[in-house]
Amino acid sequence: MQVETGRASTLPWGLITSDAELIARVTSSLADVEALLQEAAHSDHPLIRESAGHLVEAGGKRFRPLLTLVAAEFGEAVVPDVLVAACVVELTHMATLYHDDVMDEAPLRRGVQTANARWDNSIAILTGDFLFAKASQLLADLGPEAVRLQAITFERLVTGQINECLEPAPGESAIDHYLRVLSDKTGSLIATSARFGALLSGAPGPVVDQLTRFGEVFGLAFQLADDVLDIAGSPEESGKVPGTDLREGVPTLPTLYALASTDAASARLRELLSGPITDDDLVSETLESLRAHEAMNQARATARRYADEARALLATLPDIPARAALYALCDLVHSRTV
């Protein structure tokens, strides 16, 4: 990979840096992680081999392992344990996707047929369990602290998934409930991704803790930016057709802000958002109404607020190229919510 020194260049997933050596290290390490993922998803059982490799082959952002590798720059950079941890967080993420697709009855994931649609719900659930098991096998070699961290993260992932199926607690707004769910479902694993990288590379304790906090807050910021893109973005930006969440009846921050509005002019929009929208014309009407509604500005402002909070957490970290790259991630949220 050729990089021009002194000019801003892009790592996989859009992480921007002008440091050629950082790009070379992370790009090379991501290739190693990809090989580990292929190996971990392998099974002598033909159906398990096919179903487990289904999402691995489909690709993805690989953001979580990328963050693990960048966080490791604050210690001794890439050591073998960091590569294993980067594989573990991506296996964990993919396992949750198999389960999510069953719960959402989703037909497509990353542009390919989901496992539950291609086979059935039982195969999809068990494949997710298989990947969790493979992640646990890898973790066993990283020591008890890593195992404990993964267990805590897994508990939060499950808690977030369960809470997503429930109504808000008494006195809790739908928006606060949604943000709490996202903190567990999304923020927890992204925080762990950063923590693994810093911890296993030998970064100082305060740096490990600060990167963990950054990962949690940034995870919310990026998911909320995705919520905005699902309404306002193009398929090229979001990786999916606008309105996908509307069709599936999945709540997002813009729709929750719109549902919380009380003005008479929003009555039709609130009616449309009361459940899944399957009719193409109604999806178009809803998207048009949402794009013009104040709820979009509220959602943008919330995503940016979390991005700014994540950015502030970086200020006390060592001034190295990896920190500049993480700053660029926060700027990316702003650009995705324009």
Image (tube, helix red, strand yellow):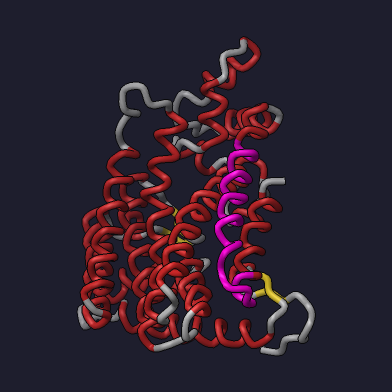
Q: Is residue 47 visible?
A: no
Is residue 274 found left or right of 137 in the rendered image?
right
Q: Is residue 319 magenta?
A: yes
Residue 264 image offset from top left, x and y in percent? 62, 10
Residue 301 image offset from top left, x and y in percent? 64, 39
Is residue 29 found left or right of 180 in the rendered image?
right
Q: Is residue 233 magenta?
A: no
In terms of image quadrants, where is residue 299? Answer: top right
**In front here: 116 or 101?**
101
Q: Residue at x 71, y 53 (%)?
A: 335
- The answer to whether residue 272 is above or below residue 77 is above
- The answer to whether residue 255 is above or below residue 231 is above
In terms of image quadrants, where is residue 178? Answer: top left
Q: Is residue 80 visible?
A: yes
**Which SS does the magenta portion mostly show?**
helix
Residue 286 image offset from top left, x and y in percent? 61, 29
- The answer to whether residue 252 is above or below residue 213 is above
Q: Residue at x 33, y 84 (%)?
A: 39
Query: In this picture, which residue range is highlighted in magenta?
Result: 299-323
In which quadrant is the N terminus drawn?
Answer: bottom right
> How many numbered marks appear?
0
Residue 329 image offset from top left, x and y in percent? 62, 62
Q: Residue at x 34, y 73 (%)?
A: 88
**In front here: 26 or 274?**
26
In terms of image quadrants, where is residue 191? Answer: bottom left
- The answer to whether residue 139 is above or below residue 102 is below
